[in-house]
Image (tube, grey):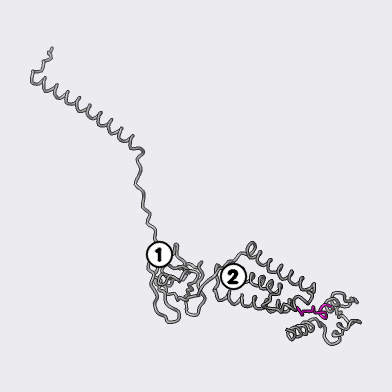
Amino acid sequence: MHRRQKPSAPEHKRDLAAHGGALSMSHNDTRSFFNFSQLVLSAGHLKSPPVLKHSKITYFEVEILDMQSKKQICIVDKVSVLFQHAGDVPGSHGASPQWYPSRVGLQLERNGPYLKDSINIQSLAVSSIITLYFTDLGQQVGWTTFFLTEYTGPLLIYLLFYIRLSTIYDQVESTKNFRHPVVHLACFCHCLHYIRHLLETLFVHKFSGGHTPLKNMIKGCAFYWGFTSWIAYYINHPRYTPPSGNHFINVTLAHQNNSGSKACFPSPTYNPFTWLFLLVSCPNYTYEVHDFLLLTCKG
């Protein structure tokens, strides 16, 4: 039988040192792992780095030329098709502050149609460089302002003639002559007509185009205000007499005898104002011209 030999003292110490070193290493690994776990838990969930998406955006170079002189106004670099439109190219109104977007007119060709704001620049591009012609459309006003100004004028102007201002009519004639009921009726109908237009402009109508040149509003106001003054002057004149011939013609047309045939024309009656039916089929227009000339001569 073999007897187990006890290790010598140096060997025994070496084994203990090795065993103790192993124990010490295992204890240190446990402590470091515990510390690492605490660090991870305190930091929260680990997030993966965001993935960068590379998007391809096409850019264009827009050259703005004056339509009349063909001189270069400005060049706009890096115009993206994602957010820029032809009617509002950045920098097209930067050379002069008064060129706000609604005043700028851009054309792809000289004497061509103006580009709309909804046209994408990419649809115009043949190459990376786009040439547009600039036109100053002048001072712009909104459509709501346009119609409110156009319709408010006739309403107020007619009332000024209706009250018979001393600067317009002779005060002696105004106080002496009696107003016919037709004058009051005409004022009521005229005011009702334009009040309806004003209410429709404010609450009913919706305008697609945002602006119009100021010169168009001046033309419209000159037409409406001028003709209102012309009509109101004669209707509210102290020597005004309502036209009778036109009234009787309209009454005859409204109460004509229907004989059953397709072609039925009114015939003159005992009333002398209807005798013009012997000459023309609708003499109401003839009386209107006659009354207009008569009132003009009186005025």
Q: Determine the image quadrant of residue 14.
A: top left
Query: Hey, which residue is sitting farthest top in the picture?
Result: 1
Please name which of the two marks, 2 or 1, marks the residue nearer to the observer.
Answer: 2
Image: 154 above or below 40: below
Query: Nearest the camera: 174 or 146?
Result: 174
| Earlier sequence position, callout 2 versus callout 1 | 1
Residue 242 vs residue 204: left or right?
Answer: right
Question: Is 242 or 265 nearer to us in this picture?
Answer: 242
Please provide percent x and percent y for residue 47. Answer: 35, 43
Q: Secondary structure at mark 1?
A: loop
Residue lying furthest front in this view?
172
**In this orientation, which residue lies closer to the viewer: 211 or 124?**
211
User: In the rendered image of this protein, does residue 210 appear above or below residue 244?
Assistant: above
Q: What is the x, y in percent for residue 272? A: 88, 84
Q: Secondary structure at mark 2?
A: helix
* Residue behind mark 2: 146
Q: Amino acid at mark 1?
A: Thr
The amino acid type of the residue labelled 2 equals: Phe
Residue 33 is covered by the magenta coloring: no
In-image side of 293 versus 48 (left or right): right
> Is 238 displayed left or right of 223 in the figure?
right
Relative vertical location of residue 169 with respect to residue 37 in this rendering, above or below: below
Tell me the CA gap for discs 2 and 1: 40 Å
Q: Is residue 242 magenta?
A: yes
Q: Which residues are magenta?
A: 237-247
Q: Which residue is mark 1?
A: 58
Place of residue 2 in the rendered image (x, y in percent of width and height, measured from the top left)? 12, 13
Q: Residue at coordinates 34% horizontally, 47% vertically from top-left?
A: 49
The residue at 88%/76% (across/down) is 256
Secondary structure mostly seen in magenta is loop
